[in-house]
Amino acid sequence: MNDAGAQARRSELAARLERVRHRIAAAASAADREAPQLIVVTKFFPAADVRHLSALGIRSVGENRDQEAAAKAAETSDLDLEWHFIGQLQKNKAKSVVRYAAAVHSVDRASLVEALARAVEREQVRRREAGEPPRAALTALVQVDLEAPDSRAGGGSGDVGAGRGGAAPADVSAIAAAIAAAPGLELGGVMAVAPLGGDPDEAFGRLQTIARNLQEQYPDATMISAGMSQDLESAVAHGATHLRIGSDVLGARPAVR
Ligand SMILES: *Cc1c(COP(=O)(O)O)cnc(C)c1O
C-alpha cells in the first residue's frame, strides 16, 4: 500500500473506531456501568490494519483461525498487543495458539483444556531453552452455546454462522472446573455468540446468569465476552466485560471463506 492509501485507510479506521467507541460509551452510560474492554476482531484483514489499529490506541485484537492469527501476530510482534483467540479450536492447533495468544475465549470441551495445558507447559520449556522469558498463564473462557438445539441443525450463513461451537449450559461448570485445575491456565469466565435470528437480550441475559453462577464458585472468573458489531448494546446491558467487534471497525468481510 502506498503512503496515501495507508493514510486514507488509517483515517477510515479512526472514524469507524470513533463511532464504535461512542456506541460503547453510550450503552455503558445507559446501563450505568463502566465501558467494557474492546477487542477488535481483525480476521480477514491484513497485518497492516492491525498496525493502524495499534497506532490508534487498540491493544486487544481477536482472531478466529490459527493460521491467519499466527502469521499476523508474527508480522506485528514489535507492537504491544494482546491476542485473543475466539474461534473454534482443534486440539492439534493448541501448540501454535499458545505461542501468541494471551486468551482463548472458545474453550468448549474438557479434551481441549488438557491440550491447552500441555501446550502451555511445552511452550514454557521451549522458551526456557531458547532463553526467552516465560509466558503468562493462558486465560481460558468457557464458550457457551446459547442456541436452542432445534435452531442449530440448519446452521447459519457466513463465517460466524454455522457451527459456532460452545458447550451446553449444563456442561459449563465441569469445563470451568477442568480449567481451574489445569496448570498454566487461568479461568477467565464465559463467552458466547448470540443465536442467529434470536433475541440477543434474552440470550445475553441467560449468559449473565450463567456467569453469575460461575462466579459464586470462582470469584476471579469475572469475564463475560459477549457482543459483536450488531448486538454490542444488548451485550453491554447484560454485563459484558469484553466486546468482540469486527466489521463495524474494519468494514464488511466476505460472507463465506
Ligand atoms: C467475527 C467474530 C466476531 C466479530 O463479529 P462482527 O460482527 O464483525 O463484529 C465476534 N466474535 C466471534 C466469535 C467472531 O468469529
Image (cartoon, rainbow, N blue to C red):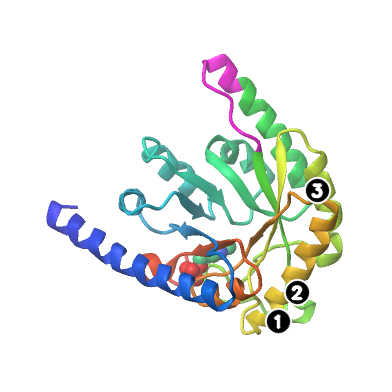
Residue under circle 2?
206
Residue 55 point in image, percent of width and height: 31, 49
Q: Quadrant of residue 7?
A: bottom left
The amino acid type of the residue labelled 2 equals Arg
| Distance from Cα at disc 1 to Cα at disc 2 | 6 Å
Characterize the local packing of mark 1: few (<14), some (14-19) or many (20 or more) Cα atoms within 10 angstroms.
some
Say which of marks 1 and 3 sits in front.
1
Q: Which residues are magenta?
A: 126-137
Q: Is residue 126 above or below residue 35?
A: above
Q: Is residue 107 above or below residue 131?
A: below
Q: Quadrant of residue 233?
A: bottom right
What label does residue 110 carry, if any?
Answer: 3
Q: Quadrant of residue 94?
A: top right
Tell me if label 1 and label 2 are in contact, CB under 8 Å. Answer: yes
Would residue 31 be visible to someone looking at this image? yes
The amino acid type of the residue labelled 1 equals Glu
| Distance from Cα at disc 1 to Cα at disc 3 | 27 Å
Is label 1 in a helix, a strand or a loop? helix
Is label 2 in a helix, a strand or a loop? helix
Q: Residue at x 20, y 55 (%)?
A: 6
**Mark 2 / mark 3, whichever is N-terminal:** 3
